[in-house]
Image (tube, rainbow, N blue to C red):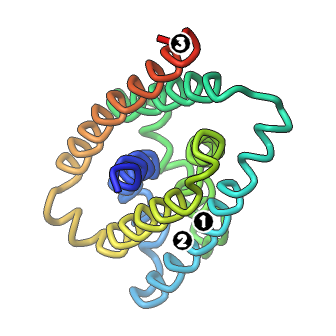
Amino acid sequence: MKEIISVTILLILIMDPLGNLPIFMSILKHLEPQRRKKILIREMMIALLIMLLFLFAGEKILIFLNLRAETVSVSGGIILFLIAIKMIFPTYESKKKSGNIIKREEPFLVPLAIPLVAGPSLLATLMLLSHQYPKKILYLIGSLLIAWMITVVILLLSDIFLRLFGSKGVNALERLMGLILIMLSTQMFLDGIKSWFYI
């Protein structure tokens, strides 16, 4: 149970639904509310299929590359740490992301499913998790589904969240999520170091 909770929190933090709220709304704002929901659900379903694919194939890919579990843990910690830093201290380019990505046509696959939800960092994390916990694939699937459902709910209720917290409140929550992710990534890194040196 503890594994499911910790992995679920980790995946939610990487999916970053609160950080993606303004971008999703900007991309879909020109559509009718009902159509907007249908597109959102469709894109989230596509993202889920892609994430499951990487979760199942990740172990085989890493075995093919002959990577040790310790290497996976250390590199995973570094990746997540960098993601968290970007969440806490967004660069000027990342702030411009929503402006650059907005298009008037109806989105399909890109940019909503990929890379906003099933981005490179999340797919890499799923590969690392499948390698670290090959015998707990059901736990990982459960965690992924829970994180995915929470993300779907947040995005479907985007209007309410933005009205409730405002853009500044959403940004503050994203930074808080970044702080939590830094702690999780540091723990993952230290676990890898301990295993490597048999501490």
Which residue is more in the foreground, 58 or 159? 58
Q: Is residue 174 left or right of residue 42?
A: left
Which tag is nearer the camera, tag 3 or tag 1? Answer: 3
**Residue, x 37% and y 35% (percent of image)?**
87
Residue position marked by numbered label 2 in the rendering: 44
Give x and y (percent) for residue 185.
42, 29
Residue 123 x, y percent position in the rendering: 63, 48
Q: Earlier in the sequence, mark 3 or mark 2?
A: 2
Percent from the top left, x then y, of residue 121?
A: 58, 41
Q: Earlier in the sequence, mark 3 or mark 1?
A: 1
**Circles 2 and 1: CB atoms closer than 8 Å:** yes
How busy is the neighbourhood of tag 3: few (under 14 within 10 Å), some, or many (20 plus)? few
Q: Whole-Å distance between the Cαs marked 2 and 1?
A: 5 Å
Residue on which disc 3 sits: 198
- x then y, percent, for residue 105: 62, 73
Judging depth in this view, the residue of 32 and 8 nearest the camera is 8
Residue 26 versus residue 115 in the image, above or below: below
Per the image, label 3 sits on a secondary structure element best described as loop
Residue lying at the far right of the rendered structure: 64
Query: Is disc 2 surrounded by few (<14), some (14 to 19) or many (20+) residues within 10 Å?
Result: many
Is residue 140 shown left or right of residue 170?
right
Which image quadrant for residue 55?
A: bottom right
Amino acid identity at mark 2: Met
Discs 3/2, front: 3
Q: Nearer the viewer, residue 70 or 165?
A: 70
In this figure, which residue is indicated by the disc labeled 1? 47
Q: In the rendered view, tell whether residue 120 sits above or below residue 57.
A: above
Q: Residue most toward the bottom?
A: 34
**CA–CA distance in space, label 3 to label 2:** 41 Å
Q: Which residue is found at the position 58% from the left and 14% from the top?
A: 196
